């Protein structure tokens, strides 16, 4: 991860776990980091860890299933840091249980976060990247996309969709 000094990056789901580790690592490499996480507290904790190390980061409580919230946070972030060079779609969520014990409302939530969320992020950020003829997108999926996952049928379907979408966009 070299050559990232002063690049502007957004990491979704950066309030904890893998997303937090990605955001911290990007900041260590010199990126200006935007943290988009549903948890305002988690996002703020990641931001504070980055700024305590002398790096620059901003955080917003963003539900990536809401295009309007994405647009607002993106506009604020780009005013503060500049145009986005790197998008890391990391956010994800599931409630593992046998498929026959699930219902449509749960499917909708899983699909909204794990499939539509990354699509919304692409739709918001890619126009600027295309205009500038510069940018990178990293979509974090799951091995569930490749082999399925017991108790995670809808989640696996979403992650499989993101893998196919990524391949299509890269082509």
Image (cartoon, rainbow, N blue to C red):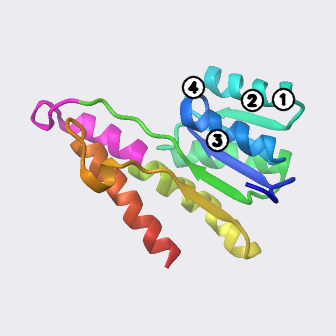
What separation in Å lies between label 3 and label 4 (alpha carbons)? 17 Å
Residue found at x 85% / y 45%: 80
Percent of width and height locating residue 74: 69, 48
Percent of width and height locating residue 166: 46, 65
User: On the image, which quarter does residue 138 sit in?
Assistant: bottom right
Depth order, front residue of 117/89: 89
Q: Element type at marker 4?
A: loop
Instruction: Check if residue 29 falls in the magenta segment.
Output: no
View extreme (left): residue: 100
Q: Contact (CB < 8 A) between labels 2 and 1?
A: yes
Tag 3: Cα neighbours inside 10 Å, few (<14), some, or many (≥20)? Answer: some
Q: Element type at marker 3?
A: helix
Where is mark 1, residue-wise? 51
Which one is in front in this view, the residue at disc 4 or the one at disc 1?
1
Percent of width and height locating residue 86: 69, 57
Where is mark 4, residue-wise? 39
């Amino acid at each position: 991860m070299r050559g990232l000094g002063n690049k502007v990056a957004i990491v979704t789901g950066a309030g904890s776990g893998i997303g937090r580790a990605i955001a911290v690592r990007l900041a260590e490499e010199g990126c200006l980091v935007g943290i988009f996480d549903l948890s305002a507290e988690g996002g703020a904790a990641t931001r504070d860890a980055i700024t305590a190390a002398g790096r620059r980061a901003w955080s917003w409580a963003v539900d990536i299933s809401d295009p309007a919230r994405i647009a607002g946070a993106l506009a604020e972030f780009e005013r503060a840091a500049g145009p986005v060079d790197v998008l890391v779609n990391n956010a994800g969520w599931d409630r593992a249980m046998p498929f026959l014990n699930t219902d449509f409302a749960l499917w909708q939530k899983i699909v909204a976060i794990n499939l539509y969320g990354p699509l919304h992020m692409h739709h918001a950020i890619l126009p600027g990247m295309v205009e500038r003829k510069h940018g990178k997108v990293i979509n974090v999926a799951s091995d569930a996309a490749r082999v399925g996952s017991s108790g995670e049928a809808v989640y696996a379907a979403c992650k499989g969709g993101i893998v196919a979408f990524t391949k299509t966009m890269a082509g």
